[in-house]
Every structure is written in C-alpha cells, then in structure tokens.
Image: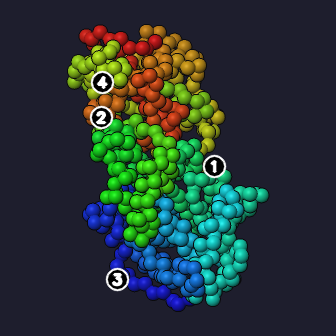
Amino acid sequence: MTKMTSKKSQADLTTAYARAVIAGEIVAGRLVRLACERHLRDLETAAARGLRWDLEAANFAIKFFSFLRLPKDGEIDGQPFMLAPFQQFIIGSLFGWKGADGYRRFRTAYIETAKGSGKTPLAAGIGLFGLVMDGEAAAEIYCAATTRDQAGMLFRDAKRMAEASRSLRSRLDIGLHNVAYHDKHSFLRPCSSEHHGLDGKRVHMALLDEIHEHPTPLVVDKMRAGTKARTQALIIEITNAGHDRTTVCWAHHEYSVKVLEGVLEDDSWFAFVCALDPCDACRLEGQTQPKDGCKDCDDWRNEAVWEKVNPNLNVTPGLKYLREQVREAMGMPTKEGIVKRLNFCIWTQGETRAIPMDRWDACKRQIDWKQFEGRECFAALDIGSTSDFCCLDLLFPHDDGELVEIPLDAEKPDGEKLSFTRRSYTQMPVFWLPEQSVKRDHRIQGIIDHWKKLGLIRVTGGDVVDYGRVLLDILALDRVYGIRKIAVDRGWQGAQICTDLMAHLGAERVVMFVQGIVSMAAPFREYLELVKLGRLHHDGNQVLRWMASNCVAEERNGLSKPSKDKSTEKIDGITAGVMGVGLASAEAPAVEVTVDVW
C-alpha cells in the first residue's frame, strides 16, 4: 500500500464538522449537536482526565478511506470512498482520541442513523483499517450477528471493498468467508450465534450491523467478553431506530443519550445518534421524540428536517427515494410505522420521559448540608428489591408557601381537586446497595461501582439489603436533621423496618404509604410541577440525576405515577421523593387536605 503521510498542519476535519454543526451551518438534531459539543468541550478539558487529541492519527484514519474503493456492478476498481463530513467526524473521533496509555480512548461506538446513510460501508472500512493499519498482531476482526446471513452482509461489503482496491488486494488473501492479512497473522471474517459460533474469540474489532434486529444481547456480550485481552479493542454498533424497548439496541440507545446529555460519564463510549426533535414545549413535557399532531415538533413529512436523520442525504438515500417512501406511507397507513422507524429514526414503540433533564439540572444548587442540621424535614423510604437499591429522601421545606389547587384527574380539570400549600423543597437522597447486588450491563455496573467509591452509595454486607444498617443510618440522620415524619413503602419488604422505626421514633412519626396509582398521582404531579418551576432544589447528586433520567410514567384512568416496570433503570430516589412530597403536602399547615396516604 502507498505510504500515507499526515502532518499536524493539516486541517482538522473532525473539529471543523463539530463547529459547523454548532454554528448551524449543517442541519443536525439535538443529539448530534451534543456529540459535537462533547468533542469541542473535550478539546478544552479532557487533558485533565488523561485524554489527548491526536490530530495526525485522526487524519491518517480519514485519509485511509480514500484508498478504499466502492465497487459498482461491472467495475473492477470502484470509486474512491470519499467520506462525508459526518463520517469524517465519526472516523476522526474514533481514531484521533487517545487515552493516558496512548491507545484509543473509545472502546464502543454506537451509531444510529436512517437507512441508506452509508453505515454499513463505513463499518466495513473501519474493519479493513483495523486489519491492515492498526499494527495489531493476530488481530481478529468479526462481522458479528445473530444469523449467518446477517453477519454475511457486512462481511460482503468489506470483501468487495478489498477486492476493488488495488492497494488492498495485493496485500490480502481474500477468500469466500475470510479476508486474511498474513503479514500480521490477522483476519476479518463473519460469525454468528448459530452453532455457538461466538465462543472463544479474541476480538480486536467487532462490527455489529442492525443492532435493532438483535433479539437478545448475546452477540454484543460475547464480542465484548472477547476483547478483554486486547489493548485497543473497538466494538462498532450501527443501527436504525427500533421498536422494542426490551432489546439491547434500546438499552444502548438510552445509554448513548445519557452519555451525550452528561447524565453518565463514560470516556470510552462514542455516540452519534441522529433523531428528529420535539419542540421545546413537548420536550419539557417529557417527549423525547416529535409528538404526532404538534405543529411545532419536527414533522417526518417535512423535507426541511430530513437531513437531521439522513446526514448523507444529497448522496444517499437521496430526495427522490425519501419522497417516494413518504408518499407511500401517507397513502398506506400500514407502512407508516416502518418508514418512520427506518427512514426517520423514530422509535415506534415509545414512552414519555417524565422528567426533562434540562429542568432537573436547573434545580441544582450549591448546598452546604451543615446549614440544614437541626432543621425539620420530612422523610420517605423506598425499599425496592431486597437485592437492589434502597433509598431514603429527606425533604426540607422552605417558608415560601402559596395556596394552590390541582385536579386529581388531569383529564377532568373541573373535578375533585387537591388543595394544599405549595412550598419549595431541598431534597437530600441517601442510597444503600448490598455488596453482592444484582449485576447489570457491565457499563452501568461500572458506573455504579464508581459511585460507591465516591461515597454516593452506602454498601451493606451480603447479597440483600441489610435493613438493620438502614435503620441505624435513619436514626443517625434523625439525630442530625430532625425528621418530623417518615413515609415507608407499604409493600411487604417494609413491614419489619416500619415496625422497628415505630419502636424507635414513635408510631405517630411513621406513616405507611401505598405506592398505588391513586396514592401517588397527586404527589407525582406536584413533584413534576416543583421540578418544572425550579422549586425542588438538589445538589446534583449523580445517582439521583441518573434515576431522574430513567423515570417513565405509568398512566391509567387519567392518573399517573412513576413506573418501576416501564422505566429504563432504577428510579427509587424519585419514587421516594414523590412519597415525601405527598407526606409533606398532607402536613402543610392551615390547609384542609385530602390525600390518599395511609
């Protein structure tokens, strides 16, 4: 292969794309803008975390693609693979960012764009780069999927690109199901979960196409496990939007959004997520996607927003194709869902995020907890699973109350109302986890372990929550802050600790709280209103912020409550906060209150 040179004086194409997006020169959705802001922010701050931007390495990888050829029928040598600006941003980011050890920073890349954006050829090119340019001895690169046919699709793109590029085919041994680079004893080949084909791999790179079609996380987990001995392994996940929120694709979509929004910190995870945007009003209501019928949200039928999810629109799939798809979808309702999902990145099975993160973040305050010592508060204990999180929230009311009324049924504003004194609150969460807690996705588990080290989570011995330790901690907090009343989940796990609290605090200070939709509906509405108005103060606790980002509401008969079943991960801190607001509202002075609290 012709030797490629790259000088530091070369233009920084990766950063140029990021700046053009932020300046509005390129049409992009909110999540892509967040990815660009992350890159620009890291250029200023990442050195403090041991990260380094290697422009020469970024441009070297981008330049490599010009040596590849995109074959066409009847041609031996195809057209050069000229990366679009968004592809330059992806490639430059993946290969230009280095960690403190000098190896690649990013270990996983989640890339979600509309169908026809060139994701598969891009992933194939990354695999060929890893094969011949990484300098990795015995590199094993896999096009991995759940079926042989699916795995073979991406492999065939890589194989054809290698065959069509004179610079590559002279160096590689290209077979039917294997592309070998004998100089380094390396290979690129397809593999699938059929016939246990994923076991025993030593993965340098894994290229996973159409993640939304993976019914289980088996392929992803096997490939990830195979990277443990590699110094700069890379897993590439490319996908359209899906429809099933129980899949690994949705889990990684949500994880990517949380990384981009700063809810979770993961310097090894790259995310490029194309999506249409809800309007500001709908987003503040918790909508993460455009709301059907809203004139201010991005409309998938409006050509002006198509580039947000089709960043290579002028090349592929092209306006003609998309116009045909939209016209057919509008004429055939049965086709609408698949067109919205594949061509416009709309997850067709959707839930509404209960708490908009920008409103949550606006409630953050600099808090000196010593100033709250001896100050009366209300407490609420959500026990959750015996082998998982247990959370206590302390809510300190402020003397700024106002008399308000809200309907118990959102669909019947003239019906029965809850009258109470609304005050602002400061919320202090306390979390416990058993030492041998339930294991989650390795990345979430790693972040939880980090929170434990920071002291944000109190660890109890064993594989279930030590309620004796929880009881002692609550009594200690009562001595410091003065708990007026404490609400305890009425579920079966709370029976014993409730009895113990009554024995130590007095029965009049302990309130059993039913987490049913009738009991939770009014305080949940008030909790959300407090967040919206900036009247629920917190100190930015990372665990509580994560739980706020996870929270999805369950709705029934016009009532709603935080749903542990529908939420993407744990929400115990939010559930306890809602209970606390319900308790505090019932105790508000000089107002007659009817609230379903026992």
Q: Which is in the foreground here, disc 1 or disc 4?
A: 1
- The three-letter code of the residue at mark 1 reads Pro
Q: Quadrant of residue 51?
A: bottom left
Find the distance from the CA under tag 2 to the CA under tag 4. Answer: 17 Å
Asked if residue 566 lies left or right of residue 21, the reply is right
Colour pattern: rainbow
Q: Please tell me which of labels 1 and 4 falls first in the chain.
A: 1
Residue situated in front as seen by the camera: 73 or 406: 73
Q: Please tell me which of labels 3 and 2 falls first in the chain.
A: 3
Is the C-beta separation of discs 4 and 3 under 8 Å? no
Say the numbered circle drawn on residue 215: 1
Q: Determine crowd level at label 1: few under 14, some 14-19, many 20+ residues with C-alpha closer than 10 A.
A: some
Is label 3 in a helix, a strand or a loop? loop
Pinpoint residue 180: horizontal percent, then vertical percent: 68, 79
Pinpoint residue 516: horizontal percent, then vertical percent: 49, 20
Asked if residue 99 lies left or right of residue 151, the reply is left
Q: Residue furthest front?
A: 331
Residue with the mark numbered 3: 9
Q: Please tell me which of labels 1 and 2 falls first in the chain.
A: 1
Residue in the picture at 50% in, 42% down: 349
Q: Please tell me which of labels 2 and 4 falls first in the chain.
A: 4
Q: Which is in the foreground here, disc 1 or disc 2?
A: 1
Residue with the mark numbered 2: 532
Q: Which is in the foreground here, disc 3 or disc 2?
A: 2
Say the numbered circle drawn on residue 397: 4
Pinpoint residue 398: horizontal percent, then vertical percent: 26, 25
Q: Quadrant of residue 366?
A: top left
Q: Which is in the foreground here, disc 2 or disc 4?
A: 2
